[in-house]
Amino acid sequence: MANPILAGNGNSPDLGPSSALIFLGTGCSSAVPNARCLIQPSDPPCNICFQALSVPPMQNPNYRCNTSLLIDYCEREGNHSYILIDVGKTFREQVLRWFTLHKIPRVDSIILTHEHADAVLGLDDIRAVQPYSPTNDIDPTPIYLTQHAMESILEKFPYLVQKKLKEGQEVRRVAQLDWKIIENDCEKPFSASGLEVVPLPVMHGEDYICLGFLFGDKCRVAYISDVSRFPPKTEYVISKNGAGQLDILILDTLYKKGSHNTHFCLPQTLEAVKRICPKQALLIGMTHEFDHHKDNEFLMEWSKREGIPVMLARDGLRIPIDL
């Protein structure tokens, strides 16, 4: 079975008129390589993590930063807007590696799935992709998030939320952000840089609601990076037997075997793919258990058997798409 995901998805920049999805990160919160494997190596050592000592990250699909997606949205007039989903601990590294390769000049808006460290701890570095102003006299970047995430970020980054300086407080250059509250509701879409986005509430552990996002009119794409269970309403919105078949499903898969209390692992991911039945699926959020090439061989056989192309994504992957 030919895998349509692979068509035209090289790592070389493509500045044509189409939109594109750029995978800035496809790894778990601790990223890959796992530091523990390198400083306290097992016997035998972890092959996936030790690859990082000999294979440059640009050539190593098993080198994975925190999950993050950049939507290069090309409108009818040919203007490009750059929409960033999540700004995790590895954001600066992702900018240096993939913004430069794919010639991404800026970020026009930001969407947050939730407020955990691997989704927000790079927010301070947003200033690096904004115009320079020593007095912060620039237009702020819109950032879309839930009220719960807003309250958490106010504690983590009060200086990014503060609007006015206190008496006697010096001006310090920080990222300028325009905080916009969205809801955990599939029926309340919002617009980010002209692209309509539908929130997809999912369970990230039974005590926590995280958001995925549905976008695209011509090609329907769902991005769900942190999920342990789909509420029925959310699954209906993205299912072939519900509101309509997805062109691309981008879905969480933490470990190769077993289960986890806050994430899908590969068995649950593949079961969800069969239920939702997208035209194709890309998996993200992997730990060092996954070997990109070997496990994609397994997934190719699974895809032939089930009739749904599925593969592990990799950092730097660029997929041209008509949104």
Image (tube, rainbow, N blue to C red):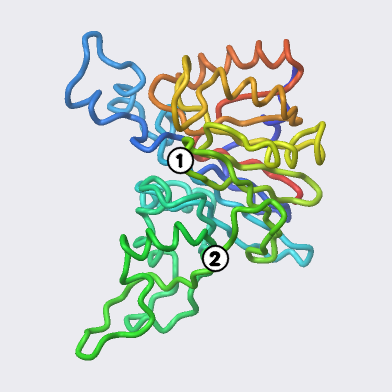
Badges 2 and 1: C-beta atoms under 8 Å apart?
no
**Residue shown at the point (65%, 26%) measured from the top left:** 272
Q: How far across and down, in percent of the image, does residue 285 sit?
A: 47, 33
Residue type of the residue flagged with mark 1: Asp
Q: Which residue lies furthest to the front in this view?
A: 207
Tell me which residue sits at (61%, 42%) in the image: 223
Secondary element at image label 1: loop
At which x and y percent is residue 216?
A: 74, 51
On the image, which quarter does residue 79 sit in? bottom right
The disc label shown at residue 153, or none = none
* Residue 264 shown left or right of residue 185 in the figure: left
Can you give x and y, in whole percent of width and height, for residue 57 in the image?
A: 39, 34
Question: Left or right of 121: which side holds 59?
Answer: right
How would you rate the neighbour count of disc 2 (Cα within 10 Å): few for under 14, some for 14-19, many for 20 or more? some
Q: State left or right for residue 292 relative to residue 96.
A: right
Identity, as a three-letter code, of the amino acid under mark 2? Ile
For the residue carrying disc 1, how many other residues have a C-alpha within 10 Å: few (<14), some (14-19), or many (20+)?
few
Above or below residue 180? Residue 199 is above
> What's the mark number on residue 181?
2
Residue at x 63%, y 63% (from the top left corner): 192
The tag on residue 207 is 1
Quadrant (top left/top right/bottom left/bottom right) for the N terminus: top right
Real-space Cα separation, disc 2 to disc 1, in angstroms: 21 Å
Residue positioned most to the bottom: 167
User: Is label 2 in a helix, a strand or a loop?
Assistant: strand
